[in-house]
Amino acid sequence: MPTRETLTKADLAELRRSALGTANPLGVAADVAEAAEQGRLEDPDDAGDALTLAAEIAEIRARPEAALRYAEQALAAYPSGDDPRAGFARALRARVLFRAGGRDDEAMSELTALRPLLLVQPDAPAYVSAALDAGGRSATAETWLSEAVDTVLNERATAASGPASTTIDPVVDLGPPDAPGVAFFLLQQRHRVRRNLNLPHDRQDDLADRLETQLVRRAEERRDAESDLLFWPRAEFDRLLAEYPALAEVYGPDWDAHRGRLETELVRLRGAGQAGLGVFGATVAGLTAFAGRRGGDPADVAVRAGYAAEVSARPSARIAWPPERNDACWCGSGLKYKKDCLPRSRS
């Protein structure tokens, strides 16, 4: 799949969603890397992210030499190795070094430098522990995550009332359903690693389970109040229900019902006084990738809420609503709005 002469943020977002589904993912990775190297990015500040995307594609497609080259170019493109955006690229480089064989010390040095990020970046527990898993260091991941959990919970308990008790649950700021706090992700990744290591369930595992239950309940409560406004184009909708049949209860049993639910919700929100409305184009690959980064199930409410938040933050994913009556319908069917989705809110 050839890339455009100049790549925009929207282009990179689309390639991130679709590259692995193309006939030649490695060709996409090479095109993206070339665009970054030749200065063909609309925003030069995207070079590190573009090269990280190329490295990720190459690593998934089992091309370690290309993945390592792209990852190192990505790190050189960021202002510094301490740039918050560089963490994933550094962990990806470590993962490739582990798999290359004979470079474990380099990989561990990279990950050790990333360890402080476990306390401050919600994504860090997932990408650091995944890299350690790839190097056969899951026990180290468990130690690092456990120590980070202890640090975060003790800091929060101390701020709230004094040193954390061994008999009373620590204070945990769960955060909103679409953006849980770092403590939640630390606990979840620790729980995942311990489960994979067949370690006995402990008190912090119990806490992880309870927090996940709370998050799911809160996300469900929010969903009852408002739709996530994710729009699945027809091909994506068919694939979604083929892979995750249970989501028919959430997004509708067929594409007509899906569009009808969105149109009805948009009409309701407009009636409640909201302006600037729209839906957000979603993909199964995007949902699956997001769930993988979070170590969750794509059908889980909390995972879907997080994916919806991620998609809604991308300007390229937004489809404005409503169109004029005689304009093309927002759903992409090719019909006029008045002949397609406009009547769906009335049925």
Image: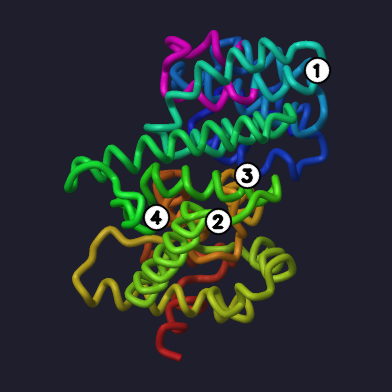
Instruction: Please tell me whether residue 80 belongs to the stretch shown in magenta.
Output: yes
Q: Residues within 10 Å of mark 1 (few under 14, many from 20)?
A: some
Measure how far apart labels 2 and 4 are at the Cα level: 16 Å
Question: Which range of residues does the magenta coloring cover?
Answer: 73-92
Image location of residue 170, percent across then percent down:
32, 51
| Residue in view at x 74 percent, y 30 percent | 136
Measure how far apart labels 3 and 4 are at the Cα level: 23 Å
- Residue 8 as seen in the image, left or right of residue 63: left
- Residue 212 as seen in the image, left or right of residue 152: right
The three-letter amino acid code for the residue at tag 4 is: Asp
Residue 193 marker: 3
Residue 100 marker: 1
Pair 3/2: label in front: 3
Q: Which residue is mark 4?
A: 178
Residue 328 appears in view: no
Q: Secondary structure at mark 1?
A: helix
Look at the numbered discs 3 and 1 and tell me whether their residues touch, using CB distance below 8 Å: no
Measure how far apart labels 1 and 2 are at the Cα level: 35 Å
Q: Which residue is mark 2?
A: 282
| Residue in view at x 47 percent, y 50 percent | 311
Which of the two residues, 324 or 330, is positioned nearer the viewer here? Answer: 330
